[in-house]
Amino acid sequence: MTTIDPKEAAQALNDIEQIVQRVRQSRIYDIASQIMIAAGVLVVAGNVANFLAPRYSAYIWLTVNVLNVAVAAALITMGARQTGVRFDFRALAAFLLFYAFGILCCGVFGHYGPRELGAFWPIYFMLFYCIAGLWFGRAFVIIGLGIIMLTLIGYFFVEGAAFLLWMAAANGGGLILSGLWMRRI
Amino acid sequence: MAELDDIIHQPLRLRIMAALNALPPGEGLEFSRLKKMTGATDGNLGAHIETLAKAGYVGIEKAFVGKKPQTTVTATSAGRGAFARHVASLQQIIAASGGNG
């Protein structure tokens, strides 16, 4: 029969804890990658649609955002058994508060134009990726900061309506690529 | 007295069982994923999975995804039970020492 001292036992339990954390993080990355790819496709579609039909911009982004929340809710709910993360009332409230504060900033305090709106929402979204990353894994921080940087480059250097196409590639494409990358780590 | 499971006790096998046990029952991990999580090499991981399978602690499923062979390893209920007892024994050893591990 194997016998070990308390120090070795503590080390073994510590090893187990680390592996469990790694598995949990990997499951969270799995679900998050699916959410990112779906969000990326929606963002590409939203920016291209906005480029082609700027008059319908408000309807386009309302649709994109509602679909984004619905898809995220569905994927989180389907993956809840694996990740332990649930889309419950608190998650819905978090989304509502997120959008309410965003609307307050850009519609009430700021009166942003289309270009500012196009930069504000992705940066605001990615800020939450960065914050979430502090708990759920540094990949979220890297992705968040990367997309914020690309958004700022577009905002300052890409002129006119081409900014929408830049955002389709930088934000939408960035999310899709990030989701694919997250699957591999 | 705490009885440790000789098969699970080996460090890499402990990591394999910990990873599989962290999944919902019936779900498994693909070989390359398990390799990444445990930090093992191909040959080493394969040999230890074989040992666990012989003890009835894990099930191995081989399938083709497209043209690529894919091996999925799943903890059996016997494996989950043995792992839980092993963890309880480790905790018992620490408790018996007054928690000064």
Image (spheres, coloured by chain):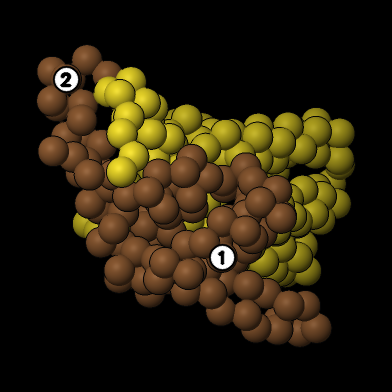
Chain colours: A yellow, B brown
The x and y percentages for residue A121 are 57, 44
Front in this rendered view, residue A97 or A92: A92
Residue A180 picture quarter: bottom right
Front in this rendered view, residue B64 or A85: B64
Query: Which residue, as the protein is rendered here, is positioned at the far front?
Result: A1
Asked if one can make out residue B10 in the rendered structure from this viewpoint, the answer is yes
In-image side of A73 versus A119 (left or right): left
Front in this rendered view, residue B33 or A127: B33
Element on which disc 1 rests: helix
In-image side of A29 versus A100 (left or right): right
Residue A148 picture quarter: top right
Q: Residue at 75% of width from left, 65% of height from top?
A: A48
The x and y percentages for residue B27 are 42, 71
Q: Which residue is mark 1?
A: B50
Asked if one can make out residue A32 in the rendered structure from this viewpoint, the answer is no
Q: Which residue is mark 2?
A: B97
Badge 1 crowding class, 10 Å Cα cut-off, few under 14, some 14 to 19, many 20 or more, is some
Tag 1–tag 2 contact (CB < 8 Å): no
Height in image: A81 above or below B1?
below
In-image side of A133 versus B8 (left or right): right
Question: What subunit carries mark 1?
Answer: B
Query: Mark 1 is on which residue type?
Result: Glu
In-image side of A86 versus B53 (left or right): left
Front in this rendered view, residue A80 or A63: A80
Q: Residue at 62% of width from left, 58% of height from top?
A: B47
Query: Which residue, as the protein is rendered here, is positioned at the far top?
Result: B100
The x and y percentages for residue A115 are 70, 43
Q: Residue at 18% of width from left, 40% of height from top?
A: B2
In the rendered structure, find residue A5 and report the number of the disc placed on it: none
Badge 2 crowding class, 10 Å Cα cut-off, few under 14, some 14 to 19, many 20 or more, is few
Height in image: B67 above or below A100?
below
